[in-house]
Image: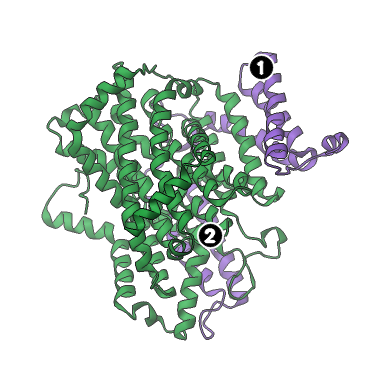
Amino acid sequence: MTEASPLTPERGVSRRVVEIVVALLLLGLAGLALWDSYGRGMGWDNGPENGFFPARVAVILAIAAVAALVSALRREDSVFVTYGQLRLVAQVFVPLFLYVLGIAYLGIYVASALFMAVFMIMLGSFRWWQTALGVVLVPLISFWVFEQQFRVPLPKGPIEAFLGY
Amino acid sequence: MDDLNQLLLGFQVALSWHNVLFMVVGVLLGIVVGVLPGLGGPNGVAILLPLTFGMDPTSAIILLSSIYWGALFGGAITSILFNIPGEAWSVATTFDGYPLAQQGRAGEALTAAFTASFIGALSGVVLITFVAPLVAKFALRFGPAEFFGVFFLTFCSFVGMGRENKAKIVVSLALGFLLAAVGMDTISGDLRLTFGATELMKGFDFLVVVIGLFGVSEILLTIEEGLHFKGKKAVMDLGVVLRTWASLPRYWATLIRSSVVGMWMGVTPGGAIAASFMGYGLARRFSRQPEQFGRGDIEGVLAPETAAHAAGTSALLPMLALGIPGSATAAVLLGGLMIWGLQPGPMLFVEKKEFVWGLIASMYLGNLAGLLIVLATVPVFAAIMRIPFALVAPIILVVCAIGAYTVESSRFDIWLMLVFGVVGYVFKKLDYPLAPLVLALVLGDRAEDAFRQALLGSGGDLSVFFSNGLVSSLMILGVLLLFWGPVSDLLKRLTGKSGRSAPAAS
């Protein structure tokens, strides 16, 4: 569904490289799980020890990762993501990363307002009042729904504390 | 007849005014979730799950399952009007749905799709009504070994019947198991795979993983496509609806065939996606004018929609009766049941009768309400697709972050959501299936517990898994399904048929 094949080959990240990186990461995870299970006992002591199951699963994961790697190497290489697409994805991902970082310091409401502003100004072509409306309404509505209607407290920062919440 | 009385009582529960209200709200929310890119059945339900913790379980599950029905209906709107499948199982609907819309027959296509969905879902609910109590009664005799046999069968059929690269399905399953193992071990009380990190002690919550894997990753994928939706307009009035309904009885054979395929694929976790393609393939093979398919044949809309919804609904049967979900959304609903302190499985039918039958009754009503609501509101929801993505995307992401946080009130979970968003993005692009990962994450601990309890009972003797007819046949069936792909290839080669046609429903 996502694999768009443009007529003129665009330059981008090689799919084969990504396949290899993912397979190696999976092998690393399998190794970690094996090491952890080995430390706690993965054998048989009047029934399976608590590392028994994860260790077996880790071995299966490692074998499957190698198989996926081999089949990826035998396939013809294609473009995983073009550089143009990657830039678009980064335009979403970087603000999202900063947003999650911001939640820790500013609370979720202020961070959401800033996130909405950055996103709408960078990626959209809205009039200033439309952006302002989005920036104000989204945090306010979520505050009303979560804190007041369902009484689910969300992370809050210094501004909310100043307002007495 | 006892069951029918129970069902009538269930209707009384489901028809109380606040439950009907939840049903309508759920269906509307579900359609929104189905229409918007980046939100689908599994993560739509996952995000709203924490909001229902304060509600009584019956109302909560009615709300959540109605979101599921709404999402199933909503997927068809975007496939037909915009040629964008809102869900993977509506891909087959685009083959004939979009050509019909191009010819200006969008109203007909939509009516056919919704009605087919309703018929498919209804056949699934009827199946649940009559078969689920029997399965549950039968499963009351299960011990840990038998339960492990059923789990084993589920995982094997995922591997054997999946359409993706087998190695990648196994990777996805194994990864889910490992994630499930992180944290406190329920039998020994030891901490596993935490590497001393306190954040990992409580383990990975599957809701957070689902929100990341399905929600955040979908936004990243959508932005990549460049985002210009070119939609067709739909003219919906009573005349179109009635005319389309009048033409439907002609296609009774297709409807029945697709329902049966869907029910089979839903109960054995082949899934709605495979069912929709199989329904489409079978309809084309049996059609008198197969060359019309792909150019705007109403039958090409009916067949996949009926099959997908029959499968999507039937996937709830093993979830209710055995505690084993047949799809990612069913897995999320199952997780919800466990959070409310309900242990899905055979005992549920004994101990929580009014809950089970209330839910089943709400399935009838929810689908009926869904059909009426969706027919009446198509233009409104088609308009949602015209809202600029630069406004919709940040709102969805904010909702995802809030959803991830509210599960456990943990800021760390928002970071996890982000990580799994990237994992989901890469996995989807590399064709690693995500449903097995979610399934293994939800069922991992229970499968392991069943395995270890069985072995503790037998003193470590593996022959416990072959100790009686029932458990042996489950295990053997599992192994057979595991190797279903190679075996069916071999059979095909032996019978000398070319592999071009759709696989036969067996």
Residue B139 sits above or below residue B378 on the image: below
Q: Which corner quadrant holds the N terminus of chain B?
A: bottom left
Residue B223 sits above or below residue B352 on the image: above
Label 1 resides on the chain identified as A
Residue B329 sits above or below residue B108 on the image: below
Q: Name the residue carrying label 1.
A: A130
Q: Colour of chain A?
A: purple
Using residue A30 as the reference point, say whether residue A40 is left or right of it.
right
Q: Which corner quadrant holds the C terminus of chain B?
A: bottom left
A163 or B424, nearer to the observer: A163
Using residue A23 as the reference point, say whether residue B186 is left or right of it.
right
B227 or B116, nearer to the observer: B116
- Where disc 1 sits, the SS reads helix
- Number of marks in the rendered image: 2
B150 or B16, nearer to the observer: B16
Using residue A136 as the reference point, say whether residue B136 is left or right of it.
left
Residue B294 in sight: no
- Return the x and y of residue B468 as percentages of the image width and height: 32, 79
- Return the x and y of residue B318 as percentages of the image width and height: 39, 57
Q: Residue at x 19, y 58 (%)?
A: B490
| Other residues around mark 2 within 10 Å, as few (<14) / some (14–19) / many (≥20) | some
Q: Residue B404: which numbered mark, if any?
A: none
Q: Colour of chain B?
A: green
- Return the x and y of residue B53 as percentages of the image width and height: 62, 49
Q: Residue furthest right?
A: A162
Q: Name the residue carrying label 2.
A: B342
- Where disc 2 sits, the SS reads loop
Mark-to-mark CA distance, 1 and 2:
45 Å
Give the color scheme: rainbow, by chain, secondary structure or one colour. Answer: by chain
- Return the x and y of residue A105 as percentages of the image width and height: 80, 41
